[in-house]
Image: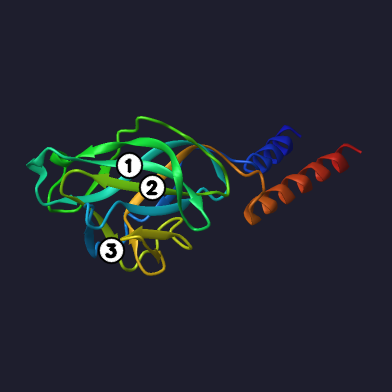
Amino acid sequence: MTKVWLAALLAFSGAVPIYGGTIIFDSTGDSKDGSTKISATVGPLYASFSTGANSGTLAALGLTLVDSSPADLGSITAILYSDASGAPGFILDALGSVADSSLSSTPTLAAVSLLANPTLTASTNYWIQLSTFGSGGWEFSNSPSGTGVANQNIEFNQALTPTSTTAFLMDVSVNGTTSAVPEPGTWSMMGVGVGLLLMSRKARQ
């Protein structure tokens, strides 16, 4: 009988998973096809992401960056923006920066030293803005397919481009929970659990 109850408990245990440091956007493994310079001429660069079913505080932000003159003592600053009908909205938080001296002409995945861990709401789009007083650039892919990349946008030169065409390379993760809506596989596990419980009741009768 104990084994039956244990099996039922294990079947139910996956129903509402809780994650720490869940990746909600990751294009860093996609092809590296070039970089867009972050400059006063082009203006700041933006990339959107969605939290999907996840909510919680921002845990990490990684950016694939290049810099042809890392000795210029500049830095690249990341800022979190809200979404306004598919375009960058207003500033939510200054997230941190990456020093040019840590970069090179070879694309480098750099972790932003977060100064803030803003709370992100589930099923919400946000934007990451990059600006610089140095010479850095943001690497992009012309064939993006990573986690959470679909149906997002980037913006440069005040023009939007869908990620079905091009995406800047970054990864975003949150500390928090997912929605309590079970996945199809979870329904199966719950069904097994219910079946085991019914069997145990019949065995006792």
Whole-number angstrom distance, CA of label 2 to CA of label 3: 20 Å
Residue 23 percent location from the top left of the image: 44, 46
Q: Which secondary structure lies at badge 2?
A: strand
Which residue is outermost to the front? 41
Residue at 87 percent of width and 43 percent of height:
202
Residue at 40 percent of width and 45 percent of height:
172
Work out which quarter of the rendered image holds the C terminus and state it: top right
* Type of amino acid under label 1: Ala
Q: Nearer the viewer, residue 101 or 11?
A: 101
Mark 1 Cα within 10 Å, few/some/many (few <14, many 20+)?
many
Asked whether the viewer can see residue 23, the reply is no
* Type of amino acid under label 3: Ser
Mark 2 Cα within 10 Å, few/some/many (few <14, many 20+)?
many
**Lower sequence index among marks 2 and 3:** 3
Whole-number angstrom distance, CA of label 3 to CA of label 1: 22 Å
Q: Which secondary structure lies at badge 3?
A: loop
Which label is found at residue 78? 1
Asked whether the viewer can see residue 80, the reply is yes
Residue contact between numbered discs 1 and 2, judged by CB atoms under 8 Å? yes
Q: Nearer the viewer, mark 2 or mark 3?
A: 2
Residue 54 percent location from the top left of the image: 55, 44
* Type of amino acid under label 2: Ile
Q: Which residue is mark 2?
A: 128
Residue 53 percent location from the top left of the image: 58, 48
Residue contact between numbered discs 3 and 1, judged by CB atoms under 8 Å? no
Residue at 36 percent of width and 41 percent of height:
79
Whole-number angstrom distance, CA of label 1 to CA of label 2: 6 Å
Left/right of residue 17 with respect to residue 130 in the rendered view: right
**Lower sequence index among marks 1 and 2:** 1
User: How is this picture coloured?
Assistant: rainbow
**Vertical placement of 134 versus 84: above or below?**
above
Q: Which residue is mark 3?
A: 31
